[in-house]
Image (cartoon, helix red, strand yellow):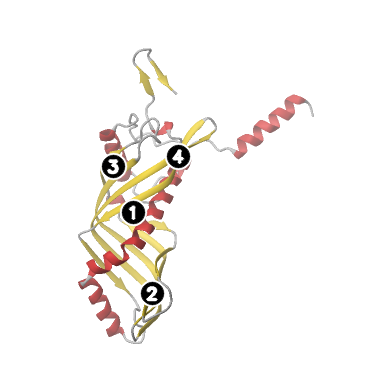
Amino acid sequence: MNKLTWLCCIFMLEGLGAPLAAELPGDIEKCHFGDSPCLVKTINALIKRYPKGIPEIGLPPLDEYNFPDAPIVDTPHRGPIWMTFNMRDNVNKGFNNATITHVEGFLRDPTKQQIILKARLPRLLHEATYDMQGRFLLFVANTTGKLQSDFQNFRLTLTIKVILEYRNNKRYLKIYDLVPVVDIDRWIVWFDNLYRENEDVTIALNRSFNKNWLEFWNDLEPGLLKTFSTVFTVLLNTVFEQVAYDDMFLPDIDIRFGYSHD
């Protein structure tokens, strides 16, 4: 094999192992780095135009978003009160109705300032299968069933820290820390089969839960926030992995010299 053929083989193998960066759809307006008003407008336009997601850039469906299994509560299995509560087959419905209200960051060097995204949804619906084991004094639970949650007037703030990775001479974002803050006006939830032996007890427990939803929210919030952190980290990192950072924005123009900074 001569040298030219050998070099061609190497080039082809490298090309097969390094896929080209994906591009944003042509109907999505690009912004300059750090242009917060433009970014708010552009992200909202993307959400409204693509409720079914954009597979080419790794954006999943926003009207029905499936996310991984989530442990919510796991206390030691001893004493008169303990609980293990996990969720699987998770689907969130309603992100397609989100409105972005605030954006910070996304500078040319995105590591210099944390990224902040704020959004609100009229309601976020969550469906899942739950697995619960626990004891509350004389009441012992070991059950599985369907769960439906309705988070009303859902307000979300994401504070994000990123690093830059380099592939094929392009810059890509990767989230290494994401802290969510969630505020809601009301939480309505229904657990099927809470007490298999007596449907009346299941109904009574659900009514009690919804009557005292705020106390339950405060107790479960740490586990739920971990779930939201995982959900949004996976969602955003999937897009950031596909679309090069600089390809998301307009090129910087140096007005002194009339050329762009690459």
Marks 3 and 2, how far apart in space? 40 Å
What x and y, as percent, mark residue 211? 20, 72
Label at residue 63: 1
**Residue for point 33% across, 36% down:** 105
What x and y, as percent, mark residue 198? 32, 86
Give the amino acid at mark 1: Asp
Label at residue 72: none
Judging from the image, what secondary structure is the residue with disc 3 in? Answer: helix
Judging from the image, what secondary structure is the residue with disc 4 in? Answer: strand
Residue placed under numbered mark 3 in the picture: 44
Q: Earlier in the sequence, mark 1 or mark 4?
A: 1
Judging from the image, what secondary structure is the residue with disc 2 in? Answer: strand
In the drawing, does residue 210 fall left or right of residue 234? left
Q: Residues within 10 Å of mark 2 (few under 14, many from 20)?
A: some
Give the amino acid at mark 4: Ile
Q: Residues within 10 Å of mark 4 (few under 14, many from 20)?
A: some
Instruction: Work out whether residue 52 can be spotted.
Output: no
Residue placed under numbered mark 2 in the picture: 83
